[in-house]
C-alpha cells in the first residue's frame, strides 16, 4: 500500500506536469461549480478542465445534435455568469430557442460564419484569446496537431475553454487538446410512468484525458443538473464507433 507521503508527491508531480503543459489550476473549485462531479475521479486535479481545449468527435448529423445538446447542458452546469458564447462555423448545429431548456438564453450565443477554412481558423484563435469570453464552440472538418497547439496556447493566456466539434472523426489524429469526447444518443425514460418524451439522455465516452482516466457513462439532464444514470445499453454499439476507429 502506498504511503500518504508518496501519494501526495505523485499528486504534486502530476500538477506540475500539467502546469508545464499550460494547464492552470487557479481556484477552479472555488470559482466554478462542478456539473460533472460523478466524473471527477477521471479528471486531472479531480475537476473538469477549464481554460483548455476539448475535442468532440461528431460522426454524422445525429451524433452532432447529441453532442450539442450535451455541450449546452455541460456549459450551463459548469460555468457561472456567462455573457456570450462564440460559435464559429458555417453549419450552426444549434437552434437558439432550444437553449432555454438548458438554462441558457438565445442572446448568449453569437454566431461567426467564416467564408473559408483559413478565415475560420483565424476567427477561432482570436475568439480563444479574448479574455472577456468564457466558452468558444467551433466546427472543424479535422483538427491537426499544429492547429490544436495554437488553440491551446491561446487559451493558456486567456483562460477561455474551447469546445471543438471535429466533424470528420475518421481523420482524427494526435492533438494538443486536453480531452477527446464522443457523445451518442440514448433513449429517454418516461417520467413517473407518464407517456411522452422524458429527460434528455446521452452516452458519454471520454476517449482520452491528459493526466486523467478515460471513462464511459450514461448521463441525463433533468432540467437543472447533469446526473449519471444506469447504463443498460453497450456504449460501443450506440456510439457506432466501428467507422470512427
Image (cartoon, rainbow, N blue to C red):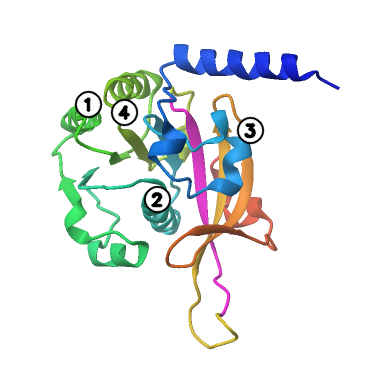
- Spatial distance from mark 1 to mark 3, Cα to Cα? 28 Å
Read off the magenta span.
Answer: 177-190
Q: Which residue is mark 4?
A: 159
Mark with earlier residue (2, 4): 2
Task: Give me the residue at 17% from left, 48% from top.
Answer: 111
Say if residue 89 shows up in the picture.
no
Position of residue 166 in the picture relative to residue 200 (left or right): left
Res. 129 mark: 1
Classify mark 2: helix, strand or loop: helix
Res. 71 mark: 2
Q: Residues within 10 Å of mark 1 (few under 14, many from 20)?
A: many
Percent across and percent down for residue 123 are 18, 32
- Relative to the observer, which residue lies in front, 103 or 144? 103
Percent across and percent down for residue 24 are 41, 22
- Spatial distance from mark 2 to mark 3, Cα to Cα? 20 Å
Q: Which residue is mark 3?
A: 213
Classify mark 4: helix, strand or loop: loop
Residue 142 occupies which quadrant of the picture?
Answer: top left
Mark with earlier residue (2, 3): 2
Q: Residues within 10 Å of mark 2 (few under 14, many from 20)?
A: some
Query: Are the residues tagged 4 and 3 within 8 Å (C-beta)?
Result: no
Furthest toward the right, the residue is 1
- Spatial distance from mark 2 to mark 4, Cα to Cα? 18 Å
Residue 122 occupies which quadrant of the picture?
Answer: top left
Q: Nearer the viewer, mark 2 or mark 4?
A: 4
Amino acid at each position: 500500500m502506498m504511503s500518504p507521503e508518496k501519494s501526495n508527491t505523485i499528486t504534486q508531480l502530476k500538477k506540475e506536469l500539467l502546469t508545464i503543459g499550460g494547464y492552470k489550476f487557479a481556484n477552479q473549485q472555488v470559482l466554478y461549480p462542478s456539473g460533472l462531479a460523478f466524473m471527477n475521479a477521471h479528471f486531472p486535479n479531480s475537476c473538469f478542465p477549464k481554460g483548455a481545449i476539448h475535442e468532440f468527435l461528431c460522426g454524422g448529423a445525429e451524433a452532432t445534435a447529441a453532442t450539442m445538446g450535451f455541450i449546452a447542458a455541460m456549459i450551463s452546469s459548469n460555468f457561472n455568469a456567462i455573457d456570450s458564447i462564440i460559435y464559429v462555423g458555417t453549419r450552426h448545429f444549434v437552434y437558439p430557442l432550444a437553449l432555454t431548456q438548458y438554462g441558457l438564453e438565445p442572446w448568449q450565443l453569437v454566431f461567426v460564419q467564416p467564408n473559408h477554412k483559413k478565415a475560420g481558423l483565424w476567427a477561432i484563435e482570436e475568439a480563444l484569446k479574448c479574455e472577456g469570453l468564457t466558452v468558444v464552440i467551433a466546427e472543424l472538418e479535422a483538427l491537426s496537431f499544429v492547429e490544436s497547439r495554437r488553440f491551446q496556447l491561446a487559451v493558456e493566456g486567456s483562460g477561455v475553454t474551447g469546445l471543438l466539434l471535429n466533424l470528420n472523426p475518421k481523420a482524427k489524429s494526435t492533438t494538443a487538446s486536453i480531452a477527446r469526447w464522443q457523445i451518442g444518443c440514448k433513449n429517454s425514460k418516461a417520467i413517473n410512468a407518464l407517456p411522452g418524451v422524458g429527460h434528455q439522455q446521452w452516452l458519454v465516452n471520454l476517449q482520452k484525458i491528459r493526466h486523467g482516466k478515460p471513462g464511459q457513462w450514461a448521463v441525463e439532464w433533468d432540467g437543472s443538473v447533469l446526473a449519471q444514470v444506469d447504463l443498460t445499453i453497450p456504449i460501443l454499439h450506440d456510439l457506432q464507433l466501428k467507422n470512427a476507429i
